[in-house]
Amino acid sequence: MIAKEGRKYGLTCVLATQRPRDVPEDVLSQMGMFIVHRLINERDRSIVEKACGNLDSSAASFLPTLGQGEAIIVGVESSMPLPVFIKRPQYEPHSRSPNYDQHWMPPLV
């Protein structure tokens, strides 16, 4: 409901999931842009292929072969799927730190 109503006002919604098949179709239909990383499961690939109007079967066939940090951007603003490489952060998060706001901060020397 938020994604549907928010689109009227230019609201952008980011949804991250490892299992696209678990996201209801009416929610996926409201998404205008997808950043798709490696998808091995056939059901997940078919859901993403249906949700992305300009992702054809030849582009979808690359999804299982994407490596770590590789993704394809697909959406209404892109005339064709755009392969991208996501760089690793300069400073790795300190996930054991009790202070969440310092997870991405450079270590103090």
Image (cartoon, helix red, strand yellow):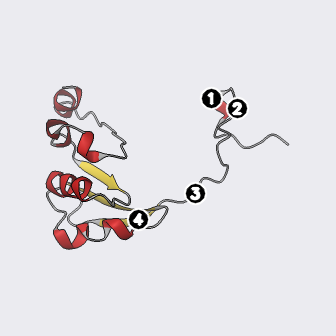
Q: Which one is earlier in the sequence, the residue at label 4 or at label 1?
A: 4
Residue displayed at 68% across by 40% down: 94
Label 2 near label 1: C-beta < 8 Å? yes
x, y percent for residue 75: 23, 55
C-alpha distance separating marks 3 and 1? 19 Å
For marks 3 and 2, the one nearer the N-term is 3
- Mark 1 belongs to which amino acid? Tyr
Q: Secondary structure at mark 3?
A: loop
User: Element type at marker 4?
Assistant: strand
Quarter of the view holding residue 72: bottom left
Residue bearing mark 1 = 100
Q: Residues within 10 Å of mark 2 (few under 14, many from 20)?
A: few
Name the spot of residue 82 as percent of width and height, x first.
Answer: 31, 66
Q: Earlier in the sequence, mark 2 or mark 4?
A: 4
Residue at the location (16% across, 67% down)?
A: 56
In this view, the mark in front (3 or 2): 2
Label 4 and label 1: CA atoms lie apart by 28 Å
Labelled disc at residue 88: 3
Mark 3 or mark 1, earlier in chain: 3
What is the spatial separation of the Cα atoms under label 3 and label 4, in whole angstroms? 13 Å
| Residue identifier under label 2 | 97
Looking at the image, residue 72 lies above or below residue 94: below
Which quarter of the rendered picture does the N terminus lie within?
A: top left
Judged by depth in the image, the label closer to the viewer, 2 or 4, is 2
Residue found 14% across the figure and 54% down from its top: 50
Numbered label tally: 4
The amino acid sitting under disc 3 is: Arg
**Callout 1: SS:** helix
Q: Which amino acid, mark 4?
A: Val
Q: Which residue is mark 4?
A: 84
- The location of residue 38, given as percent across then percent down, is 38, 60
